[in-house]
Amino acid sequence: MTAHVHNTLRRITPQLIILAAVLMLNFMVFPDFFRIEFQNGRLFGNLIDVLNRGAPTALLCIGMTLVIATRGIDLSVGAVMAIAGAVAASLAVDGHGWHVALTGALAVGAICGLWNGVLVAVLRIQPIVATLVLMVAGRGIAQLVTEGTILTFLDPGLIHLGAGTILGIPTPILIWIGLGLAVAAVVRKTALGMLIEAIGINESSSRLAGINSRVLIISVYLISGVCAALAGVIVAADIKGADANNAGLWLELDAILAVVIGGNSLLGGRFSIMASLLGALIIQSVNSVILLSGMPPEFNLVIKALIIIAILVIQSPTVKHALYILRASAEPQPSDPIKEAKESPQ
Amino acid sequence: ADLTIGFSQIGSESGWRAAETTVTKQEAEKRGIDLKFADAQQKQENQIKAIRSFIAQGVDAILLAPVVATGWDEVLEEAKDAEIPVVLLDRTVDAPEDLYMTAVTSDLVHEGSVAGQWLVDETAGEKCDIVELQGTTGSSPAIDRKKGFEQAISGHDNLNIVRSQTGDFTRSQGKVVMESFLKAVGGANICALYAHNDDMAVGAIQAIKEAGLKPGEDIKIVSIDSVPDIHLAMANGEANATIELTPNMAGPALDALEAYLADGTMPPKWIQTESKLYTLKDDNMAIYEMKKDLGY
Amino acid sequence: MASVTDPVLECRGISKFFPGAIALDAVDLTLYPGEVHALLGENGAGKSTLIKCLTGAYRRDAGTILLNSQEISPNSTQDSQKLGIGTVYQEVNLLPNLTVAENLFLGRQPMWHGFISQRKMMKMARDLLAEFGLSVNPAEPLSAYSVAVQQVVAIARAVELSGKVLILDEPTASLDRDEVDLVFSVIEKLKARGLAIVFITHFLDQVFEISDRATVLRNGRVVGTRLLADATQTEIVTLMLGRQLEDRIHDRAPSATGDTLIELTNFGKRGMITPFDLTVRKGEVVGLAGLLGSGRTETAEIIFGAVQADQGEALLEGKKVTIKNPREAVAHRFALCPEDRKSDGIVGDLSVRENIILALQARQGWFRPLPKAKVNELAEAYVKALDIRLASLDMPIRLLSGGNQQKALLARWLATNPAFLILDEPTRGIDVGAHAEIIALIEKLREDGMALLVASSELEELVAYSTRVIVLRDRRQVCELAGDDITTSNIVAAIADEPMAEAV
Amino acid sequence: MRSTHLPLLITIATFVLAYTLCASQYPAMLSTRVVANLLTDNAFLGIAAVGMTFVILSGGIDLSVGSVIAFTGVFLAVILRDTSIHPLVAFVLVLAITISFGAAMGAMIHYLEMPPFIVTLAGMFLARGAAYVLSTDSVPITHEFYDTLQSLYWKAPGGGRFRLTGMIMLLTFLVGIVVAHRTRFGQNVYALGGGLSTARLMGVPLARTTIGIYATSGGLAGLAGIIFSLYTSAGYSLATVGVELDAIAAVVIGGTLLTGGTGFVAGTFFGILIMGLIQTFIVFDGTLSSWWTKIVIGGLLFGFILLQKGLTWATTLRRKPATEFAAQS
Ligand SMILES: Nc1ncnc2c1ncn2[C@@H]1O[C@H](COP(=O)(O)OP(=O)(O)OP(=O)(O)O)[C@@H](O)[C@H]1O
Ligand SMILES: Nc1ncnc2c1ncn2[C@@H]1O[C@H](COP(=O)(O)OP(=O)(O)OP(=O)(O)O)[C@@H](O)[C@H]1O
Ligand SMILES: [Mg+2]
Ligand SMILES: [Mg+2]
């Protein structure tokens, strides 16, 4: 058990260090960055904002990590967010309660995920193209639901999901942390995690080993769809309206980026949801630097690009390897313990 | 229908634009015109393609809501060669005037300066630190509305823009960026918000409320477009002023076209729509009720 | 013979460390022109690693390489190719998406006015392949051909590249006798031309047939170099293993006595394998013999549901069952150890431990994870039982040597405790010691009442453990041998025979 | 005929079929205007897609092309506005920049072993950001050399104008085809797509090829940017957002596998035509609302993929059953 915790910690160390560094950068451009107050019945502060605003990306990340672990990719999550937000809003406008709206939205997300999953697992269309279809059409579907307007709703229960607080903590924070931990626990406490990794590494071998790869692949896209739907509901609830045109626009790229910053390979296989979530927080902290720095907006993208490139370079296998060699050469050649390790299991 | 008119719309990126599309379709229907609608998904190249296809199809006239001012000479020339009149909607282009028949637009710079002027009058010399929510970086409304506003407040030393960041014309970004303004500047230090469109202002209002301040009182809010939701906010006293950008550009445009096609009456080169200022003095609830079904 | 001339290639003190393992420890190797030098050793001894260090595929950690007394230091395989060292690596390393001709001449295409001349290239490819007795269409993508064809193409490519040295890492593992003979005749020609050839294999017969000298590695160290003219097989084996290989007398496997386990009638798939009947009893080993492409692998795949049969029915212990996919097969307690371990067997990045329990876990279902203790117990037991050489159970399986990967796959299926075990080329790339162990294992499993179906190109091996042998030709069963009829010569005769009345 | 030419034939067949269907609905689609428009309007996209084809053949992806096109336009506009440099010199300058930019991304991908998706995503942010920094306004280009280039067209009977830009695209495709199939570089690109580690063992110069591929893509995106600036006579930092996805879609519709190693530059040409045809058809129809436009584009994209999949499946089913899933791993 403790070994497990230790392994997880070691896996996410690079992300923790980078997150700390980016937060320090925030602190440098805005000295009050770490101040948190209790104000107006809720926690109030930049750090809370990072956690709160990171919610959509973090939620997308959960599903995206699993999809990427199977060697797939889901470009449609942004569009699915828009659809789910639109569906929730229109249900709320029609006078249904928040649980109906939420259930409806999640169901629609699940259907979208199922669609993607079937295209990938059954029709064997390459994931990037398969999900491109829904990425293009999905926003149209969302606009069809809202008829191109921002569909405003007043249901307090639904609004609470995006803009409310529980014990002073914004609800979205609790939702993404809760869901993240739950999914991470489920995949690691069951065999799902390993089987997903096996599919991502070598699907043919996995299938021959008796793994039901088809159902598993469909499931991960389904989970991704549901996560996206939840993110869509939160984003809509946050502004009390479904903005089919803009909700989740280009957010799929942020989600993929977060997964990669989380140290997961786009070629599938080994994954860590925790690390991806940290990746999402890192991206949100970068956004926060940009907002707090007060630079003119035309520099936003350049700053973001440069910080991200720096992070990726530090994380690249080559640089990691070079650091490893540096550290190893500082110590005496560990030849004897290795020999023992090699001979002991025989 | 005896008239076929092609309409190249930018896209459906905002409620205002959706309303413009709706109104245009209504106006065409009212007049019995067969409207060929093409949505360009925010891409100029798609608009050019659409215009070329309209020409190939032999439509009687073309309505164009250009996504950007530059880059139309070539295709407009082709339209001219094919003797198809082109009317520009809601934005003008950087092309020789003889390449299009007329432009039905508001004056974006003017809108900005109306907003600025309102704030100048409202503050009456009192010191006021302003935060600005810009539109999408590089878009012409963002550039011109900023320019107009700055022109209006220049020379008034009591007015200062302390922070300016893009909110991408969206409600959610408006809220996010306002949140960061409130922290970076301090809610008590912000006296007014100028948003390049109403959607961002609506988002910002929520951020202000969540920070425990009263929008409209603690922070004055002026924005542009006059969409229904901002009138609702004004009716509740949560926003102070908005400048109308009418979605009915097609009405005057089609009037001009019909007159031209009927007897060759040349309209003026620029038909400017009114940039009407609404404040708390107006009956905002009534305006909201009137506008809410227009497809915003 | 060679000592009068100067060596072509000399390796001095080559070392290679991997995290957790010393793969090569100051290895010396000297090659003379015109000799075939066998490189021998158990699975995991470091043969492939030595080759890769030599050709620049790996960066060596110590040591020098001299080519014609000049020190060289190839940093990439491209460098070594330029220096005249042609290599066939252990797993076929060609590009399935390119055509045969493109694979043969990648990087050295015949040019015409600065552009590749397709016509010339096709002609050259056809000529080259003819030398190896292969008459395939060089314009077809390589993926259209079997592993065996690909292997020959790889050899042909390496031969073309080797101006001075040719290195062959287990080139004959998936070839049968005729092809091996062709390859050997080419090797003889090259030898006469004065090339130095390194030949790695686990078939000692082939070593003695073609090689002049042999260097034996054990645990990354050179334990000896012998002139093969003066050495005996036993001596070499003892050198490799560090111990004597017990001579095991194989009793003729008794005819099956157990109950019928599985009965297939009219099982087949159009365009793939002619419908066949097959009955396997408990405690029986059915051998599948045939030439390359005769349909052995297809038979195995169709029975396991890897490819779905489009006709016929299956009875399992008298009950009708469907085998639509491997999952169903595994549920019926079938197991298939596939021929192509790299693409259909191992899950490269998963640990050896996870690879061993993978099939068992898949059968258990997603939500019933095997307890940690059980996993460790299973993995350790099989590593011990099959003598899998590894630094740690946590290392990714792709880092194991080829033979050890094969053993780990066997462990995966044994862990599911199958009722019916299908083995497709179970001893490919397995060293002599392990070879004997696997044969012993097959016999033991049979005695324990398991039903086995084994496809193999090694007839001696088939003869040793089969209770029945089915011979395939052109994707149909042509003959069945049982009891004392099972001899290599009978099988060869059956394979060669024209299709006649003896069909099953 | 190689069996691998099949996807190409299928793409061409799909295009011919689709064009016939469209023309039977709207006879005006047979006019030279529509044909000329297909070439002119898609010139920049086509050129960028040639580069994308090489990238995708090698198993990579380049998300930066849209931003690079926009950057090129803004750079040209600004430099022609603020200096007296001749456009041809400016072209050379901007091509040098975009080629180096691509090469730098290639170098990062190779030497730092980072996935292309992410490197080029960062490149996409950077190029667009650089365009913003140069100018947020759209900057018109008013050089007489531009007018000269724009006046180079052949007016076909029926009113179609076959412009220089369309011809440059065709030329780019021709060169692309020759490079892909008749040069060592092209073969190495396919080799990379077949498997990186295998290609390494076979002695393919990985560094040179990878950098070359992304430099090519960057350079062609730069050329596409020049064409786009000719097309619009302006530079605008918000232009060509999402063009990379269009280019990828065109490449895929053209029968190239995103996993790399199989496909044709010529296929991409028909992919471009098919996409252009979809758009033309939608405009001719003219009844679709904004949202239905998106849904229909997505639906048609799906339809084409499905059609291709179906045809491929139907024609390969008989050929190689044994390798059913060896092919995907
Ligand atoms: N990249 C690596 N990291 C760690 N260990 C490795 C790596 N590559 C090989 N090894 C180890 O080095 C040893 C030598 O492997 P090698 O492949 O050279 O054996 P081999 O003699 O070719 O065996 P075989 O006959 O089975 O092919 C093995 O124990 C293997 O596990
Ligand atoms: N010499 C050849 N020429 C053309 N095609 C071949 C040749 N050899 C094999 N093939 C093709 O490759 C496919 C797979 O052959 P493979 O060698 O795997 O069959 P097999 O009977 O299982 O043989 P083995 O298991 O001994 O390798 C066959 O379907 C056959 O069509
Ligand atoms: Mg080996
Ligand atoms: Mg076989």
Image (spheres, coloured by chain):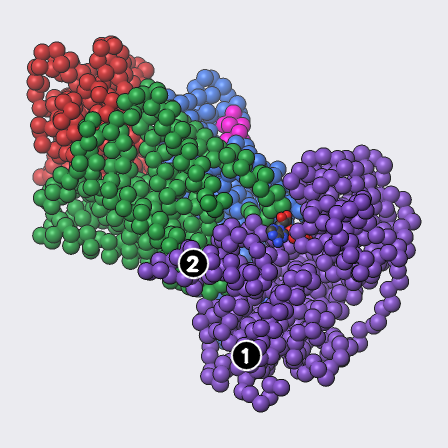
Q: Tell me which corner region of the image, top left, top right, bottom left or bottom right, holds residue C204.
A: bottom right
The kind of residue on which mark 1 rests is Gly
Relative to C498, is A332 above or below? Answer: below
Relative to B109, is C178 above or below? Answer: below
- Which chain shows up in purple? C
Real-space Cα distance between discs 2 and 1?
28 Å
Helix, strand or loop under label 1: loop
Q: Nearer the viewer, residue C45 or D28?
A: D28
What residue span does the magenta drawing correspond to? A104-112
Judge whether residue A107 is colored magenta. yes
Q: Which mark is residue C254?
A: none
The kind of residue on which mark 2 rests is Lys
Q: Nearer the viewer, residue B38 or A262?
A: B38
- Which chain shows up in red? B
Q: Which mark is residue C120?
A: 2
Side (left or right) of A247 relative to C272: left
Chain under disc 1: C
One can see residue B255 in this view: yes
- Which chain shows up in blue? A
